[in-house]
Image (cartoon, rainbow, N blue to C red):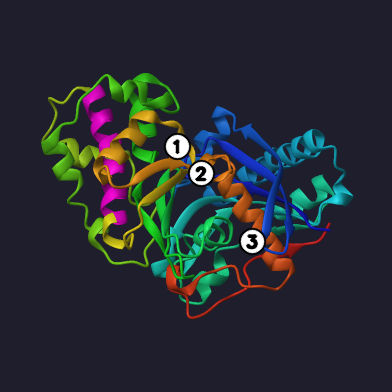
């Protein structure tokens, strides 16, 4: 069997993206895609678990059980729309929900209950993809550049693939097999948090609220002083650094800024930090392809294009034949395939690990 399901729930905490993929040699085909939204209470609990709190061990376990139920719903939907049965699928590869990422302390934590998911689905489950890379001295992230190279790499054509989820990361595909990748900084995480605080919306649809405001240059300059941005790769980050308390500390000197102007400035911040990373590491690539939720924010896409300049084409991965919201789920399906083939899933040049490693842990059906 060459059919695998990949499940991805990222730092945006909005829900789970799923993809049913077929692998034949170097070819990857998307058979079906699905999305299951998280209910507000689960989303709030996952957000709360990003920091230490009362009774968090039990609360995490209960949240993991709920996650398994929603992951199972996504699997069922993929099987339904594709007309496949559980026995047609080799494995479900699931990322889990990151609640702590501290590679500098030797651990990363993706809450999940893969044993329960295997029971619910009747399919082998492969999980915990990041820990082995961290054990080998790596960041455990980003893992998608290896898949970006496999799916989008083209000999003689340097290009950049940028994923804009809660956090942004880039994969620089040199055209000769070399890959550079790292987390560049915030993607949607600050924009989502700010609009939720002021308008009780989960995200800024198509950047409409940001479009009603204007960039505050002094605030943008303050945000750009964040030391993480100037650290050399390999590096990774998450909500441990970029959160509303971090933003509030930098807004203290800009209390007169209108909320919509802050939103526009945060959109610019994501665009500029991405563009700066691409300019520094992009190796002269003249095409940048965007995946993740940020690809659906036209204000952000326009800001990124402006920050990169007219000499660089900016488009979504749809231009390469893959929907932007499917790429990460496909990446974990691919990592599940690599696990079963006992092939490495990491790129040491990206994560900083001591060598290539087979990533994941198996929970048989």
- Which type of secondary structure does the marked residue at label 1 adopt? helix
Residue 326 percent location from the top left of the image: 59, 43
Relative side of 270 to 66, left or right: left
Asked if residue 204 shows in the view, the reply is: no
Looking at marks 2 and 3 on the same chain, the residue that comes earlier in the sequence is marked by 2
Look at discs 2 and 3 and give the one toward the viewer: 2
**Residue drawn where x is 57% and y is 39% of the image:** 323
Camera-side mark, 1 or 2: 2
Q: Main secondary structure of the magenta part?
A: helix
Any magenta on residue 266? yes
Point 62% across, 55% down: residue: 332
Q: CA distance from mark 1 to mark 2?
A: 9 Å
Whether residue 124 is visible to the viewer of this picture, yes or no, is: yes
Q: Quadrant of the C terminus?
A: bottom right
Q: Circle 3 — which element?
A: helix
Q: Position of residue 280 (x, y in %)?
A: 26, 60
**Inter-mark Cα distance, 1 to 3:** 23 Å
Q: For the residues carrying marks 1 and 3, which lies nearer the camera in this image?
A: 1
Tag of residue 295: 1
Q: Is residue 56 left or right of residue 74?
A: left
The dot on residue 335 is 3
Asked if residue 158 is among those painted magenta in the image, a careful observer would answer no
Q: Residue at x 41, y 21 (%)?
A: 200
State yes or no: discs 1 and 2 in contact (Cβ < 8 Å).
Answer: yes
Q: Which residue is mark 2?
A: 317
**Mark-to-mark CA distance, 2 and 3:** 19 Å
Q: Is residue 157 above or below residue 54?
A: below
On the image, the x and y values in percent for residue 55 come to 53, 47
> The N terminus appears in which quarter of the rendering?
bottom right
Numbered range of the magenta stretch: 259-278
């Amino acid at each position: 069997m060459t059919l695998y399901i990949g499940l991805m729930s990222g730092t945006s905490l909005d829900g789970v993206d799923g993809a049913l993929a077929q692998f034949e040699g170097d070819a990857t085909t998307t058979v079906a895609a699905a999305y299951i939204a998280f209910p507000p209470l689960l989303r709030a609990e996952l957000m709360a678990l990003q920091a230490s709190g009362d009774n968090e061990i039990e609360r995490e376990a209960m949240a993991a059980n709920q996650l398994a139920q929603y992951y199972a719903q996504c699997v069922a939907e993929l099987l339904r729309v594709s007309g496949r049965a559980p026995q047609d699928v080799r494995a479900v590869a699931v990322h889990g929900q990151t609640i702590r990422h501290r590679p500098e302390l030797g651990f990363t934590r993706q809450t999940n209950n893969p044993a329960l998911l295997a029971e619910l689905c009747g399919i082998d489950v492969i999980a915990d993809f990041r820990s082995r890379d961290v054990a080998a001295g790596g960041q455990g992230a980003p893992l998608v550049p290896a898949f970006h190279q496999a799916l989008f790499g083209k000999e003689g054509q340097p290009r950049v693939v940028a994923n804009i989820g809660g956090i942004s990361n880039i994969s620089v595909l040199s055209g000769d097999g070399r890959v550079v990748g790292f987390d560049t900084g915030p993607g949607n995480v600050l924009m989502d948090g700010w609009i939720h605080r002021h308008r009780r919306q989960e995200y800024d649809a198509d950047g409409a609220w940001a479009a009603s405001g204007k960039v505050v240059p002094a605030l943008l300059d303050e945000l750009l002083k964040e030391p993480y941005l100037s650290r050399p790769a390999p590096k990774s980050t998450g909500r441990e650094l970029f959160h509303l308390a971090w933003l509030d500390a930098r807004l203290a000197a800009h209390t007169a800024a209108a909320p919509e102007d802050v939103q526009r400035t945060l959109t610019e911040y994501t665009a500029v930090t991405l563009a700066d990373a691409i300019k520094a590491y992009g190796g002269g690539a003249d095409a940048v392809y965007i995946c993740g939720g940020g690809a659906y924010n036209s204000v952000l896409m326009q800001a990124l294009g402006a920050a990169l300049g007219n000499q660089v084409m900016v488009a979504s991965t749809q231009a390469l034949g893959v929907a932007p919201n499917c790429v990460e789920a496909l990446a974990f399906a691919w990592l599940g395939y690599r696990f079963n083939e006992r092939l490495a899933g990491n790129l040491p040049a990206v994560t900083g690990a001591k060598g290539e490693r087979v990533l994941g842990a198996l929970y048989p059906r």
